[in-house]
Image (spheres, grey):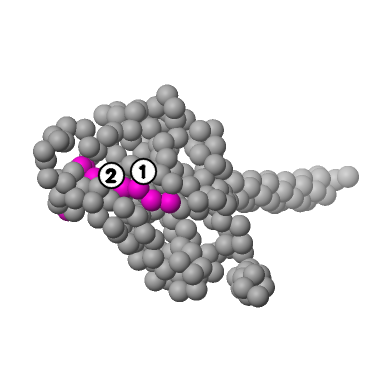
Amino acid sequence: MNHWTALRLGSSLLVVGIFLFCCVLGKRALAEDSNSFTFEALTSLDEMTDFIRKNVPLHTDRTAVRRIFVDEGRGTLKSHPTQEGVEKYIYDINLCRYYIWRWNISADFDAQGKLLQAYVNAFPVFADGKTPRDPLKGITPNQKATIYRMQRPRPEANKGENSLGFILFDGGANPKTVDDQVFMGGGPTRADPLNMGVLKVVKGEQWRSIFDFDAANFIAPYSGDCAAVDKKMAERRK
């Protein structure tokens, strides 16, 4: 083999090597991208709770929490109107126009931006995390209070439950102040139009729940086959 033949062979091997290296990088990037968090990947309240316990433990930095639920999951970030260090990530899914499923993941952080407690649709995640605040603490027995029967409109679910009902106890009789309010309501446990799980009742801060009136940036379509869902629904009505 002469010098020029060896040089051409070496150049060819170099090109092949670069090509294979780029392919590996591409596959790795695709793998990393496919492993990004999506709200649709989790179907139930229990799955989301387990995910947070494993991937967002107590003392996780706020930037890491936002990276998962906002940057990757495309959830809508909302800061609490009065409570410092409290924020939520909401994500709506239209279950074939039968129900609008809302993920409301809220989080409490300390002054250094470390996670103190997380909530899944108003249910606290960590038993050893920050104790959920009592909105009625400090309200005197003779203070004027009001109980409201409320509806959270969901007009996009025009084939099914287009309004969510709940009860709101307002310790200050002013619906515009949220820190002295406690809601009670029930919702399904699964984001599956053919198997919504069971009705689970929760009480707490409305802002953390499926009944909050904040709007998500968008309502995601159901990732399954809505034609198949419609067929099953029609069969159930017979």
Q: Residue furthest front?
A: 142
Three-letter residue code for mark 1? Lys
Q: Is residue 229 above or below residue 42?
A: below
Q: Is residue 217 above or below residue 141?
A: below
Badge 1 element = strand
Q: Would residue 97 be seen by someone viewing this image from the given angle?
A: yes
Three-letter residue code for mark 2? Val
Give the magenta part as a residue range.
Answer: 176-186
Neighbour class for label 1 at 10 Å: few (<14), some, many (≥20)? some
Residue in front for this viewpoint, 174 or 93: 174
Q: Position of residue 150 (x, y in %)?
A: 29, 59
Residue at 61%, 57% in the rendered image = 195
Q: Quadrant of the C terminus?
A: bottom right
Q: Which mark is residue 182?
A: 2
Residue in front for this viewpoint, 238 or 79: 238
Q: Is residue 197 left or right of residue 175?
A: right
Residue in front for this viewpoint, 135 or 36: 135
Q: Which mark is residue 203?
A: 1
Q: Position of residue 14 (x, y in %)?
A: 72, 46
